[in-house]
Image (tube, rainbow, N blue to C red):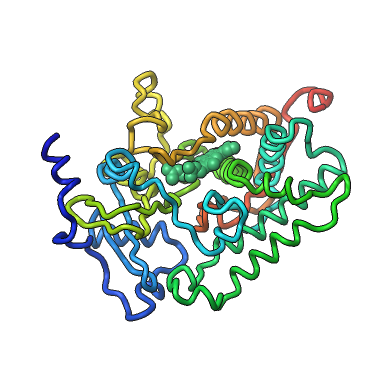
Amino acid sequence: MFVSWHKLTLSTTSLPLPPGPYSLPIVGYLPFLGRDLHTKFTNMAHTYGPIFKFYLGSKLHVVINTPELAKVVVRDLDDTFANRDLTVAASVNPMEAKIWPFPRTMRRGVAYIAFLTEANVITRMVWDDTTYKGEQGIRVGAELQTVVSNVTKILEQPNLSDFFPTLAWFDLQGVERNMKKELKKSQGPNDATSLNIIQVKTLLSDFMLAGTHTTTTLIEWAMANIMRNHKETFRLNPVSPVLIPRVPSKDCVVDGYKIPKDCVVFLNVLSIHRNPRYWDNLLEFNPERFLANEGTNKWDYSRNNLKFVPFGSGRRLCPGIPLAEKMQMFILASLLHSFDWSLPEGEEHDLSESFGLTLKKSKPLIAVPYQRLPDKSLYM
Ligand code: HEM
């Protein structure tokens, strides 16, 4: 106890930064990072170890890849790591740092059904009597999708102003300008069926942004996996393969390395979920691995098991877990109970991934439903 306290409070000035690749002057590691951060980070962990660093522009970034080190961040130093990284695009939004990713494009497939269902539930939580029903509902739902999808596109865009804060004033890529424009558009004319600014602000608040896309992505992966006889969706295809970055509020020490105040810290969930040290036959379909631990809380993601963290952990743990658990079960059960599903004629199963603010299927799942219940009236 004394040793770990001593380690944590040791002066950080003499300590090295974590290991990591060489960076180019000015741009840092930016040209080498690519789009698929989750795969890139996992490969880099093989080379540099469980904690490594790189620079994007002038900003230091640190990636944590094991449950043991994740524990230091989200348990021992949870308080220090409670802040999020506020990008320029996020700071334009009225909800500021609380903003959360949303889909690049809303696709009319399994994801569309899941989106509307989840959006309905969350909207009813916010405005009690609102439901996206009939033509009006479809119009408001589509309006909402457009707003959040455009906002997400802007949030996902790598922005030079974030890597070179001194250039932020020039807004070289127009990210700040576009975000302001997008938010202004949503303040347009208001009639009984269109969204006013207060409603849009509320809708863009954490719960709507964080709640719908996550569940939608999960359902789409689950359906794709189930149609191929897989069920371990949360472990194999975590919705957030790299947690939204944390920013330490003061210098601290992780694994003997100095982690300076205000650097950007990622927790690499995918490398934890697919690490042979923690999972036997890690790519194998084996839902029984979870059943074996039933009742022991060993797989309870809201508590101390940091080998399985689909909802994150610590004081930034997803607050939507109770709703997410109920909704994903409800949506999946409804889809599977009511219909048999198959791929359109001639289509092959495709589980390839596309990294963004969440880990989406790169190809939207379009599935054909076949009536399963004996009587059509049961579908009303
Ligand atoms: C399948 C469904 C969902 C998944 C996989 C998921 C996953 C996550 C993850 C990984 C985080 C980051 C946690 C961390 O950094 O430690 C998070 C944060 C968050 N989630 Fe969820 N989530 C889901 C559904 C929901 C729902 C339904 C809501 C609300 C209605 C919600 C609200 C939030 C909010 C507000 C945050 C930000 C918490 C903070 O920064 O303090 N999520 N979620």
Report which quarter residue 16 is drawn in.
Answer: bottom left
Q: Which of 345 and 36 is in front in this view?
A: 36
Residue 53 as seen in the image, left or right of residue 370: left
Task: State the quadrant of the N terminus.
Answer: top left
Q: Residue drawn at (64%, 70%), measured in percent from left and top?
A: 177
Q: Position of residue 307 (x, y in %)?
A: 33, 38
Residue 138 as seen in the image, left or right of residue 181: right
Residue 222 appears in view: no
Relative to 97, residue 114 above or below: above
Task: State the quadrant of the C terminus.
Answer: top right
Q: Nearer the viewer, residue 335 or 129?
A: 129
- Which residue sits furthest bottom? 25
Q: Residue drawn at (68%, 53%), measured in percent from left and top?
A: 107
Q: Where is residue 152 in the image (x, y as percent from the top left)?
A: 61, 58
Residue 73 appears in view: yes
Q: Residue drawn at (51%, 70%), measured in percent from left and top?
A: 159
- Which residue sits furthest left? 3
- Which residue sits furthest top? 295
Q: Position of residue 269 (x, y in %)?
A: 38, 47
Q: Nearer the viewer, residue 302 or 288?
A: 302
Q: Residue drawn at (17%, 40%), measured in percent from left and top?
A: 5
Give the number of marks.
0
Report which quarter residue 89 is drawn in.
Answer: bottom right
Residue 44 as seen in the image, left or right of residue 163: left
Q: Nearer the viewer, residue 345 or 283?
A: 283
Q: Position of residue 341 (x, y in %)?
A: 66, 38
